[in-house]
Amino acid sequence: MKKTKLTLKDVALQLGVSTATISNAFNRPDQLSASKREEILSQCKKIGYSGPNKAAQILRKGKSNIVALVLADSISYMVSDPVASTFIKGVSGALQKEGKHLLLYPGDSKSILDVVDFVDGFICYGAPRNAMLVDELAVTPKPIVTVDFDIDDKPSINIDNEEAAFEVADHALNEGDNLAIFGLRLIDSPSTCRIYDNPLIGVESSISHRRLDGYLRAAKAKNVNVSRERIWHLPESERSFARQAAKELLTSSPRPNVVLCMSDIIALELLHLALDMGIKVPEELRITGFDGIEESQRTRPTLTTVCQSSAAKGENAALVLLQAVSGKTILPFEMRRGETV
Amino acid sequence: MKKTKLTLKDVALQLGVSTATISNAFNRPDQLSASKREEILSQCKKIGYSGPNKAAQILRKGKSNIVALVLADSISYMVSDPVASTFIKGVSGALQKEGKHLLLYPGDSKSILDVVDFVDGFICYGAPRNAMLVDELAVTPKPIVTVDFDIDDKPSINIDNEEAAFEVADHALNEGDNLAIFGLRLIDSPSTCRIYDNPLIGVESSISHRRLDGYLRAAKAKNVNVSRERIWHLPESERSFARQAAKELLTSSPRPNVVLCMSDIIALELLHLALDMGIKVPEELRITGFDGIEESQRTRPTLTTVCQSSAAKGENAALVLLQAVSGKTILPFEMRRGETV
DNA sequence: AAGCATGAGTTAAACGTTTAAGTTAATGTT
DNA sequence: AACATTAACTTAAACGTTTAACTCATGCTT
C-alpha cells in the first residue's frame, strides 16, 4: 500500500532525527549510541524501510560490490565449455563468500565503457575475442586481474603453459615420430584449417602460442620433424569443429601416430573417432589433451593430459581481485615463543 | 595524466555550454541542433570524456540495464548442470542482443535486498533453494519472470510437466511392470534415500511434483502398482549422488525393470551402471530421462527422454522480462489491401 | 574553576547525472 | 504589425545517499 518507496529522509523525518544518524545506524555503528541504534533499526523494520538505497550508495560510495567477469568469448559459448564453467564456479564461490555479485561480461562485446563506472573490478578470463577490450582494460582505473593471459603489469594468474606443453609432448613422443598438432585460435581465421602460411596471431598474449612453443621444443629435443602443414587450427574448442578436423586428419596420409591437442574436448573427439575407425589407441595413435576435464578420465582408455585446476584458478583470481578492491592485504602471521611468559 | 575523472560539469564548463546540453548530446539528439551535437561529441572525444557516468545514471534514471538471473541453487552448481547452463545461454544471448547485462544471482543467498535497488528486473530459474527469496521476489516492485515454477500471478514460463511425464511414462510402461522412480528434491532432506514415510515438500510449486503426478497417472492407467519405497529421492541432479542411488537400486530385489528418472544426468548414470553390470537395456531394464541434454543422444543405446529446449526457454524468459522492463509491447501487424490504391 | 577531550548528534555539501520548466530569438500566421 | 509557434538552449531541482566539519553538552584533568 506504499505510495512510493521510503527514503532515508522520510525515515529521518518520522523518527525525528537527522538523515546522518539513520545512515550511521546502518553503516557505522560506532557513530551513535547502541540504544539509539537499536531503536532506529527496529523502527525501520516496523515502518518497512529495508535500508539505504543501493543505487544511491553506488554513486555516493563509488562501490557496488559487483565484480565483472570478462570472458574470452560470448557467455553462450563460455558457459558450455567445461573448463570455463569450472573457472566460473571457482570465481563465483569466492565472490559469494565475500558478499560480492557476479556480472558475466562477454568478450565479444563492443566496449566495457557501459559497466566500468559501476563495477568494483574486473576478472578477465582469457584474451577477449574483441581485442579492443584489452586496450580498454589496460587503462581502466578499476582493479583488474587477468587469467591465462597478461595485460602489461596487471596482476595475472597463469600456469607455465610452455613447460606443461613440453612435458606432455615429451612423454607422448617417447614413441611415435609422425606428429600433428591441434591448436586453438592460432591464426586469425574463423574456419577449421591447417596453418600453412597463415600468420600466427597474438603470439605472446595467447596461451596457445606458449603451448605451441612447448610442443615444438619437445619435438626438437626428440629430433621429431614437424612441418607447418601438420599444425592445425581450430577456431573454438567445440565438438563439431573438432570432429570435422579429426576426420580430415585421420584420413590424411601418412596418418600421424602422435597428435597433441590443445584441449581435452578436441582430444576426446579425436579419440572417439579413432576408436570408431578401428585405430588402436595408443598402439597406433598416441593422443594428448590439455586441461584435465572430468570427462577425460571417464573414457576408455583414459586421456593423457595436462591437469590444471580451473576452479582453483577462479578462486585465486577472485581473491586477488578482492584484495585489490579492498586495498587490504591480510598476511599470515606466526607466534614466536620468547621467554617472557 | 588525468588528475581526476572528468564529469559532465567539467566538460560543460570547458565547452561553454550548460550541462543539460552535454547530457542531451548523449541522450536526446532531438533536443539540440545536429551541428552542435556533432561538435560536442567530437570535443568530448578529444578531451577524453567517454560519456555520462553510469553509476549516476542508475540513480537518476532508475535504470541500470542489469538483469539479475536468480538461479535455483548456488552458481557453482548451476553452471555445471547442462540443463541450467543451456538456459543461461539462452538468457545471455537475448540480453546481449538488447545491450543488457547479466548478473548471476545464487538461489542460496540470504536476500535479494542487496541488488533489488539497482537491477532492472529478475529472471528466476527454478524455485530458489532459500525459500525466503521467493517471498521477497513476490513483493518486489521490479519486473520479474519465473521459469519452471510460479509466483502468484507473475508471468512465468513452463512446459506441461505433468503431461510430459505422463507421456514418457506411458510409453515406458508398454513393457515392464516393476516400476521405480528417481525423483529430484522431493523431500526436505539433503541425503539420498527412498521416500518411505518422508513427507513430500513444496507440492505445488515444484516441477518435481508435477512430474511425479504424471508418472503416477500413467502407472495407474496401466494398472502398475507403485509402492512408496519405490520412489527415490535425490537432492541434486549430480552424478555422484545418482551413481550411489543407482547402485542401491540395481542390487535391490526384486530388481525393477522400468525406471523413470527426473533428469537425464541421473538416467545416464543408471544406464552406464546397468551396462557395466551386464544388464540388457532395454530388454531387461527400461530407462527414461528428462530434459533431453546432448549427452543423452551420444550414448548407446540413446536415451528415451523428454526433450525441452532450455535455450528457447531462456530466450523467451529474457524477452518477456525485457518487454516488461520497457513497458512496450510490439505486436505484429499485417497490411491489408483495400481498393484505394 | 578553567581548559580539554570525548561522545552523540546535526548540518550541509558532495556524488554525477537527468529533466521539467523557463528563457530567448527566430520564424510563421493572419 | 501583432501574435503564436517553434527551435535551441539554460536554470535549477531532483535522484537517495554518505561524510567531513561543526555544535553542544558531559565528564575529566590539573
Image (cartoon, coloured by chain):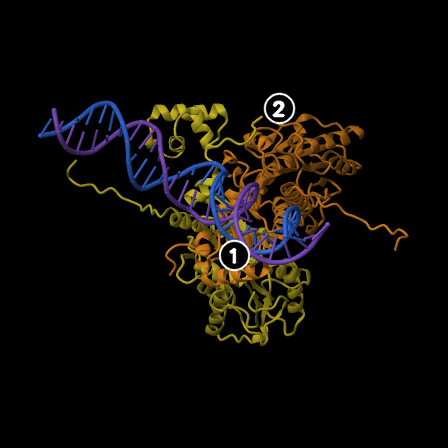
Chain colours: A yellow, B orange, C purple, D blue
Instruction: Read off the chain for label 2.
Output: B
Question: Where does residue B52 sit, x and y in percent of width and height?
Answer: 50, 52
Residue B228 image-quadrant placement: top right
The CA span between labels 1 and 2 is 44 Å
Q: Which residue is mark 1?
A: A291
Q: Which residue is mark 2?
A: B199
- Tag 1: residue type? Asp
- Tag 2: residue type? Pro
Residue B235 image-quadrant placement: top right
Q: Quadrant of the C terminus of chain B?
A: bottom right
Number of residues whose C-alpha sits closer than 10 Å to that of mark 1, classed few (under 14), some (14–19) or many (20 or more):
some
- In this rendering, the answer to whether B204 lies above or below B331 is above
Is A66 on the left-hand or right-hand side of B134?
Answer: left
Q: Of all residues shown, which one is farthest toward the right?
A: B339
- In this rendering, the answer to whether B293 lies above or below B170 is below
| Residue at 41%, 63% in the rendered image | A152
